[in-house]
Image (spheres, coloured by chain):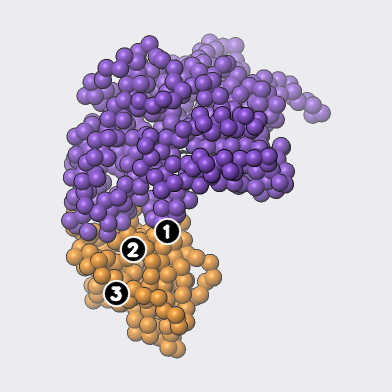
Amino acid sequence: MSLALATTSRPDATGAPFDVDAVRRDFPVLAREVNGRPLCYLDNAASSQHPRAVIDAISSYYETSHANVHRGVHRLSQEATDLFEGARETLRGFVNARSTREIVFVRGTTEAINLVAQSYARPRLGPGDEILISWLEHHANIVPWQMVCEQTGAKLRVIPITRRGEVDFDAFLGLIGERTRLLALSHVSNALGTVVPVERYIREARRRGIPVLLDGAQAVPHLPVDVQALDCDFYCWSGHKMCGPTGIGVLYGRESLLEAMPPWQGGGDMILAVGFDRTVYNALPWKFEAGTPHIAGAIGLAAAVRYLQALGLERIAAAEHELLEYATRRVEEIPGLTIVGTAPEKAAVVSFTLERVHPHDLGTILDHDGVAIRTGHHCAMPVMEFFGVPATARASFAFYNTRAEVDRLVESLHVAREMLG
Amino acid sequence: MDLKDLYRDVIVDHNRNPRNFRPMPDADRHADGFNPLCGDRLTLYVKLDGDRISDVSFQGDGCAISVASASLLTESVRGRTVPEAEALFSTMHRVLTREGEDADPAVLGKLAALSGVREFPARVKCASLCWHTLEAALHSEAAPVSTE
Ligand SMILES: Cc1ncc(COP(=O)(O)O)c(C=O)c1O
């Protein structure tokens, strides 16, 4: 995507397009068939697929170096610890955090947001305080705040969106104020693909001394992210949407804030010394990593980062943007089809409805042709409500998708129209 | 498995032109059903004459399977007694899952058109939502029915 976002230039980002056939051979699952047709996987916003490099990194770890981390002097424990902490350094570099102390491994975006809600927000909030989110949010960036509001008496305020699916900046300026204690925004909407120009929002919040959390679950796989350039306080994302494993994700937190936050969960690894009358917590980032972590997950995620960086994040963004433009043009030709979410800046997500054909039926009919899309409310029920639809169908593209796959999507949509329309 | 097994002509017809698709202001019983997975929502209305279902209608928004299933339901339970409707529900339940492969077509009538659903496990809940909702309406359970 040729976005004027906070980017860092990568040495490998040459701008020249890559060979998509060669890239596809890196992903074993793309060779399989569904219902006798080659798999056409267009559900990348829900979860992406894994290149061989990620699968190999995980198996090689299990085959040669598995042991618990941070607690043994024996060889395997040392190796596992080196791999795990090495992964942390890779993830630090990926978003250009200042230090690995700011990189906390969690289960995913959901856990990262809950951690901030309970450890940062809960002790600080009281009646009259406000948390500001937008109408675009995934349930993961709504419910943890509702819970904290219930616990503290604080209020959740919601920035409205426009018919195109953009967060309404003017309305935001009217909502942010004296009582706002935290701004929590998605960087890219999963339901619509809207890229939120978060820089403007962060600037306004920081001018008022209000910390900002970004839900980067959909952003990280598709555009280069630099947390220092963004100047946000928390950035949350999941491994499984960027070719990494499930069960692993990252909370980036500004060190001064993390330092001041109490631990979220207690147990092993997050302590330095335990006595019955006093326990000394571990340093950052381990203070927030109670218990044995998902070691293989972190290693797999680091391998995903290296894979994406070798391809070039700018080239990935460009390839996906090209697919988005082509897919948008092609599906718009289908009579009765309406694209939901038409913001000027979008990730490679096309959410739509088709007259007289319910999204759930579309999902089944497309699956019959080997085409995998997501149908439903996409864990963003308020977005569906805003557009007055119970559900949409959503095709979401990754850099390993092709124009030919877009054509198959369109072909299957015609079949659905003929069958049910 | 063939898509035409799922989307049989009867289903397509009942989806395009759902029968008894109307509110019933003077209903004796009604219940709401909701399938959070796909957003199907329906309200089922029942008028009772003793323990006989003298009228039944529905409204809502859902996929072809859930709309057609509800439409077919209204046609097949009208005029039946509550115990008869409940017996039909249990037969339907077996038809929609594997166990009902031997169900008597004469008992089912047009409902047999839904038997293809069992080949598409992800869609069974769409077809059964209206039946669970009918059950709730007959027992007038206050909370909306959810398939989850
Ligand atoms: C924008 C957004 N936020 C949060 C999440 C939750 O991510 P996870 O389920 O990996 O915790 C998702 C994933 O569906 C998402 O798309």
Question: In this rendering, is residue B24 above or below A107?
Answer: below
Q: Colour of chain B?
A: orange
Query: In the image, A137: left or right of B118?
Result: right
* Residue found 26% across the figure and 70% down from its top: B17
3D distance between C-alphas at marks 1 and 2: 10 Å
Q: Quadrant of residue A260?
A: top right
3D distance between C-alphas at marks 1 and 3: 21 Å
Q: Amino acid at mark 2?
A: Ser
Question: In this rendering, is residue B34 above or below A300?
Answer: below
* Residue found 44% across the figure and 41% down from its top: A166
Query: Considering only order in the chain, which callout, 3 or 1, is on the residue closer to the N terminus?
Result: 3
Residue A11 position within the rendered picture, expressed as x and y whole percent measured from the top left: 38, 11
Circle 2 residue: B66
Closer to the camera: disc 1 or disc 3?
3
Q: Amino acid at mark 1?
A: Asn
Circle 1 residue: B35
- Residue furthest to the right in view is A277
Q: Is residue A265 visible?
A: no
Query: Considering only order in the chain, which callout, 2 or 1, is on the residue closer to the N terminus?
Result: 1
Q: Secondary structure at mark 3?
A: loop
Q: Colour of chain A?
A: purple
Residue A256 position within the rendered picture, expressed as x and y whole percent measured from the top left: 66, 22
Pointer 3 local density, CA inside 10 Å: few below 14, some 14–19, many at least 20: some
Q: Secondary structure at mark 1?
A: strand
Circle 3 residue: B19
Dot 1 and dot 3 within a common chain: yes
Pointer 1 local density, CA inside 10 Å: few below 14, some 14–19, many at least 20: some
